[in-house]
Amino acid sequence: MKKIFSFVILLLSMSMIQAQLKYPITKKVDQVDDYHGTKVNDPYRWLEDDNSADTKAWVTAQNEVTFDYLAKIPYRAGFKKRIEELSNYAKFSSPQRKGDWFYFYKNDGLQNQSVLYRQKGLEGQPELVLDPNKLTKEGTTRLIGFILDKEGRYAAWGISKGGSDWQEYYVRDMQTGTDLTDTISWVKVSGIAWQGNGFYYSRYPATAKGKELSTKNENHQVWYHSVGTKQSTDQLIYEDKNNAQRFHTLSTSDDERFAFLVISDRGKGLDGNALWVSDHESTDKTFKPIVAEPSNNHYSVVENIGSDLYIETNEGAQNGKLIKLSIFHPEKSNWKTILPEKTEPLTSVSSVGGKLFANYLKDVTSRIYSYNFEGTLLAEVTLPSLGNAGGFGGEKTDAFTFYSFSTFNYPSTIFKYDIATGKSTVFQKPTLAFNPSDYTVEQVFYPSKDKTMIPMFLIYKNGLKKDGKNPTILYGYGGFNISSTPSFSAALIPWLEQGGIYAIANIRGGAEYGEKWHEAGMKLKKQNVFDDFIAAAEYLNLTKYTSKNYLAIRGGSNGGLLVGAVMNQRPDLIKVCIAQVGVMDMLRFQKFTIGWNWIADYGSSDIKEEFESQYKYSPLHNIKVDIKYPATLITTADHDDRVVPAHSFKYAATLQEMNSSKNPILIRIDTNSGHGASNTAKNIETTADIYSFILFNMGVLPRF
């Protein structure tokens, strides 16, 4: 009786909140663009200026409506508390050795940022190196890099503020533990590569106003900084003003003999890179091409043995291979294949202890093999179960290495791997209030519209009944050659505890089955991605894992584009949509910050054929006035300089205007955050709001 009474109260609460919901008035402007003869209205163009007073007032008004709505959900606080409880356990990264010292990150549980420690030897006492939580009161400054020089004397360490992609770097003397006066600004899309008494880094030019950051993201440059000097004296190593939208990044070999310049040109729709090399031991230290111009093939240097380079590439091998070449004879006729292409995609190759370690994906789970440098198979690394493994880095003289392993019901655990014996032992295992055996991880395969079989992971609590009434979140990404591999998140457990299912569809556009899988979801073939996701929803309905009244779809960034497009195409399939930091305006994405970089995957509205394809699925441009849209929560952040918040602003305003149902269309705009939550607290709050919004609009009463 009590449960029935509570459910009635919940339904009454829903009705009252929906009735009281009033969106802010969003003004419209007369803006029409001509794309190859097609006229396209853009009445909310003014929201693209996120610094204007009008936009800031709109943001404030929208947040007032959204957070007032969320505050009235009776179990919102319960979700937040439970996520905090389960997330409050110590988390460690794999140690990285430099000389006698081992460096690692640790988060005690609910710290906003992980803290960097080091210890002398594996049995030494940990000592604090850097605590980014102390850099700002809000804990939104993130440590994004700590790179030691060859001897371990100096470290270049970088920060990102408020979730921004812009970075600043400093230099620390590891003997004294103090920072020098070096300050490096205007850094973006960069690595740090030590050579001699300094390091290479990539940046954009400073603007005329000094430290104000460039918004054009053009003329990406490589510079060299000498320790103990001002940035104004740094040496410009490389730039290409004739190709202003290229990325230029530089790395060095472990022995610092070679510098490798990687050049990409994604703004021109090219998915690969060029590769140039400079020999520090040569009298001629100019960069010479191994591959002179970017194409759709990628080239990544894994290791060098003297003047021989080992390079991972997909040239002539869509699933990837490893080749060897001499810098003195880099012609393709002299390339030797060390690890030939396999039926499974090669996701990475690393080198440690005189061995090669290759990570392959088989049905979206890791397989790790060790080889000698002639390509002879030595051993397969025995993993705890089917899941995701990464690591196996270090120096040529190391006798052991570390790797991490996790899956949906197996928290990330650090293993020590003995290179000579091939034996793995647990090095650091987390302890948390969670019993993996209480949950089922299932992998299913379902047919898409064109009969392509798509894998999908399903995670749920044991004893699930297939009665079509299980609250389900269907997640997808489907782009940029990124695979949705198994990983553990304590924040997922509260959803599962409430009888929820979490489904992850490994749709095309990712790298789950190599470059062919990626290409099948790119540019003119992007509709395959949406078809795959729609088929996943249909499969979950057909098999009665859930039904349309209990299905939520969720995606972020490229995944936000995914769920926005799918909601337009099949609103009848879903009850709730969670669109996070999504690319919603497919006609103008390339005009904002780094957006031109995505042309390689999406194409460009400047090309007629590609415009016609994008216009058919662009989330912003396919909202119809006569459609009853599901309950929708859109999330973005004021510091997102990757997918600028204008995408979500315009999308939310259009949905609020055109939606013909009584379902809420809300936008949650985080402050002092970026493309992802800028600290642990914000991530927990956002997750609690998402779970609460979903169940509230499904009419499901959680059991806390």
Image: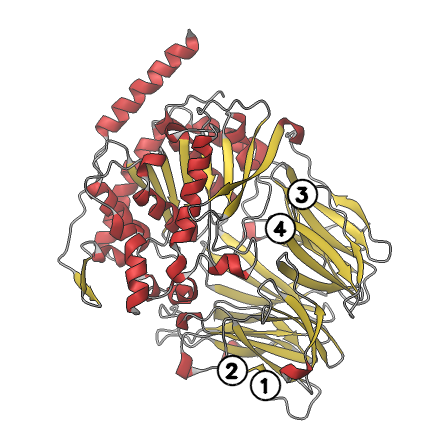
Dot placed on the residue nearer the N-terminal end, 4 or 3: 4
Dot placed on the residue nearer the N-terminal end, 1 or 4: 4
- Res 38 → quadrant: bottom left
The structure residue drawn at horizontal position 43% and vertical position 31%, both measured from the top left corner, is 541
Verify CB contact (< 8 Å) between mark 2 and mark 1: yes
Q: Distance between the residues labelled 4 and 3?
A: 30 Å
Q: Position of residue 495 (x, y in %)?
A: 50, 31
Q: State the residue in front, 613 or 679.
A: 613
List the residue tagged with mark 1.
287
Q: Which amino acid does label 2 sit on?
A: Tyr
Q: How far apart are marks 1 and 4 (CA)?
A: 38 Å
List the residue tagged with mark 3.
386
Q: What residue type is labelled 1?
A: Phe
Dot placed on the residue nearer the N-terminal end, 4 or 2: 4
Q: Which colour scheme is used?
A: secondary structure
Q: Which of marks 3 and 2 is in front?
A: 3
User: Which residue reaches farthest top?
Assistant: 1
Q: State the residue in front, 89 or 180.
A: 89
Using the image, determine if residue 273 lies above or below residue 547: below
List the residue tagged with mark 4.
115
Circle 2 packing at 10 Å, graded few (<14), some (14-19), many (20+), is: some
Assign a secondary structure to mark 4. Answer: strand
Using the image, determine if residue 303 lies above or below residue 575: below
Q: Quadrant of the N terminus?
A: top left
Badge number at residue 238: 2
Dot placed on the residue nearer the N-terminal end, 3 or 1: 1
Using the image, determine if residue 47 lies above or below residue 385: below
Q: Which of marks 2 and 1 is in front?
A: 1
Q: Position of residue 146 (x, y in %)?
A: 62, 62
Q: Distance between the residues labelled 3 and 1?
A: 43 Å
Q: Which of marks 4 and 2 is in front?
A: 2
